[in-house]
Image (cartoon, rainbow, N blue to C red):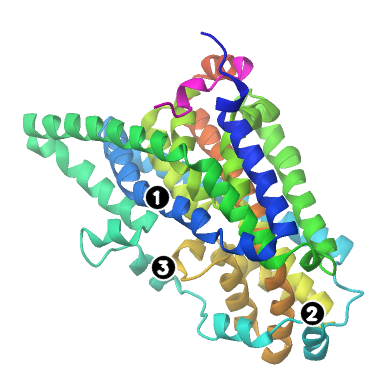
């Protein structure tokens, strides 16, 4: 196969788009901010495809399993893996932020925030209705109000529930059930082809999103909070290579560096859009190409986007303790352990809470009442100033964590062809996934 020209390579196109977006945001912020619809439009196109793709993949995968016991076994193994990985992520974030204590040299007050040009009222409006979701609320949120509302709302867990029930009912139809399954398999191929076409717009989406971020928040927003931002990204890198890396090497028998290189296009798209959902369908395709069985991919990846948010877990502990240090709030060891316990639950329910990880963190700190709400609002305002840049790190780490956890579960279940996966990573080719018209 002849090598594609560099300018046709998606990896190269996205890099150029990101650099152009940064340049526009720096030199012409007003024009850069107007590019926001490009980034949002691309994300919306992706989100439009996620629910039907997840449904078809899960139905096809679950129907391909021997019985529902196998489905339950894979689900339990996935949840156990998610729980261990996210707990370790929370603890690592807690330990490192305790060691460095970012923000301890700051004296955040409402006056200091105002002098920096930030508006505490903006944050107050975002968090005034934020509440911690109870376990009952979280379970109820998984159940759609109607069959079609699961798809229209774009809630991954609701689609997951509908797909499992649908796949469970198919065998009872006999031959007609097999015909329906064949139709779903064909329909999923069409959906993935549509995704390939949409991915052609990834450079435009990355350009618009990164231009808006730099134009809106600028480089100046990083000055006072650069320490926290740097420690957060360093922690994410250390977690990937010192926690997930050894598991990949000694349990899965695969190289983390080569796996990251295999996902280079997806990582760049996430870097530009700050959304790990923007590459969910492509991640599922690439994991299948590595030799992971489709049933496992169909179950573990969508569930991971709700239960395995390792990047968000690191962000929760680091952001919360930064506010505590920066506002010079006294906190006991018992309160820190309580914070860790609450965040263990909040990190799983983040997908079921209206708003971003920022809202979940705000609701967690508010529920603990370890500082006056006025002081908390001021601390949250500082975090909010760089949340857009931290969300990129969260999304990148979530993507890598979900990919590696899927490989771990596949290996555990005996659904990973390690020799094939190693060969694919050694070759490093993914041209067949690059969109071509």
Give the crowd class for mark 1: few <14, some 14-19, many >=20 residues within 10 Å. Answer: some
Give the crowd class for mark 3: few <14, some 14-19, many >=20 residues within 10 Å. Answer: some
Q: In x, y percent, where is residue 433?
A: 46, 26
Q: Mark 2 and 1 residues: CB-CB less than 8 Å, in contact?
A: no
Residue at image point 23% right, 49% down: 165
Determine which residue is flagged by label 3.
138
The residue tagged with tag 3: helix, strand or loop? helix
The residue tagged with tag 1: helix, strand or loop? helix
Q: Can residue 255 be seen in this view?
A: yes
Residue at image point 33% right, 42% down: 53
* 232 or 206: nearer the viewer: 206
* 362 or 348: nearer the viewer: 362
Residue at image point 58% right, 34% down: 265
Cα gap from disc 2 to disc 3, whole angstroms:
29 Å
- Give the mark, 2 or 3, whose residue is nearer the N terminus: 3
Residue at image point 88% right, 61% down: 99
Tell me where the magenta segment starts and ends, as one range.
Answer: 425-437
The residue tagged with tag 2: helix, strand or loop? loop
242 vs 395, left or right, is right
Cα gap from disc 1 to disc 3, whole angstroms:
27 Å
Q: Residue furthest top?
A: 1
Determine which residue is flagged by label 1.
45
Q: Is residue 143 shown above or below 193? A: below
- Give the mark, 2 or 1, whose residue is nearer the N terminus: 1
Task: Tell me the quarter of the image containing the C terminus.
Answer: top left
- Res. 331 mark: 2
The quarter of the picture where residue 253 lies is top right
* 30 or 383: nearer the viewer: 30
The quarter of the picture where residue 87 lies is bottom right
């Amino acid at each position: 196969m002849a090598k594609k020209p560099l300018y046709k390579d998606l990896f190269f196109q996205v890099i150029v788009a990101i650099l152009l977006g940064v340049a526009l945001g720096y030199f012409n912020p007003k024009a850069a901010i107007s590019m926001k619809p490009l980034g949002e439009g691309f994300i919306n196109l992706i989100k439009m495809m996620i629910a039907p793709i997840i449904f078809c993949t899960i139905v096809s995968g679950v129907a391909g399993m021997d019985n529902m016991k196998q489905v339950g076994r894979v689900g339990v193994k996935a949840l156990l893996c998610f729980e261990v990985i996210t707990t370790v992520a929370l603890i690592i974030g807690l330990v490192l932020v305790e060691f460095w204590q970012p923000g301890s040299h700051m004296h955040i007050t409402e006056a200091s925030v105002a002098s920096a040009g930030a508006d505490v009222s903006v944050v107050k409006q975002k968090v005034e209705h934020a509440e911690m979701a109870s376990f009952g609320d979280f379970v109820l949120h998984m159940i759609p109000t109607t069959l079609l509302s699961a798809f229209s709302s774009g809630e991954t867990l609701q689609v997951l529930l509908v797909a499992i029930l649908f796949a469970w009912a198919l065998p009872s139809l006999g031959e007609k059930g097999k015909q329906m399954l064949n139709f779903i398999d064909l329909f999923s191929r069409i959906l993935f082809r549509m995704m390939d076409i949409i991915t052609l717009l990834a450079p435009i989406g990355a350009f618009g999103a990164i231009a808006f971020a730099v134009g809106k928040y600028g480089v100046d927003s990083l000055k006072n909070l650069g320490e926290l931002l740097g420690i957060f990204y360093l922690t994410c890198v250390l977690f990937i290579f010192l926690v997930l890396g050894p598991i990949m090497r000694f349990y899965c028998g695969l190289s983390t560096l080569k796996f990251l290189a295999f996902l280079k296009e997806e990582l760049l798209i996430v870097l530009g859009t700050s959304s790990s959902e923007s590459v969910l369908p492509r991640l599922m395709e690439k994991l299948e190409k590595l030799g992971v069985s489709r049933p496992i991919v169909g179950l573990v990846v969508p569930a991971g986007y709700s239960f395995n948010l390792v990047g968000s877990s690191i962000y929760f502990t680091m952001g919360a303790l930064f506010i505590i240090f920066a506002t010079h709030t006294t906190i006991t060891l018992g309160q820190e352990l309580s914070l860790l316990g609450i965040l263990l639950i909040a990190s799983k329910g983040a997908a079921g809470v209206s708003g971003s990880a920022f809202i979940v963190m705000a609701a967690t700190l508010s529920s603990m009442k370890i500082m006056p709400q006025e002081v908390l609002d001021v601390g949250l305002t500082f975090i909010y100033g760089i949340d857009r840049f931290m969300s990129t790190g969260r999304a990148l780490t979530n993507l890598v964590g979900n990919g590696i956890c899927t490989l771990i579960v596949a290996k555990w279940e005996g659904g990973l062809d390690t020799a094939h996966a190693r060969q694919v990573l050694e070759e490093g080719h993914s041209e067949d996934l690059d969109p071509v018209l």
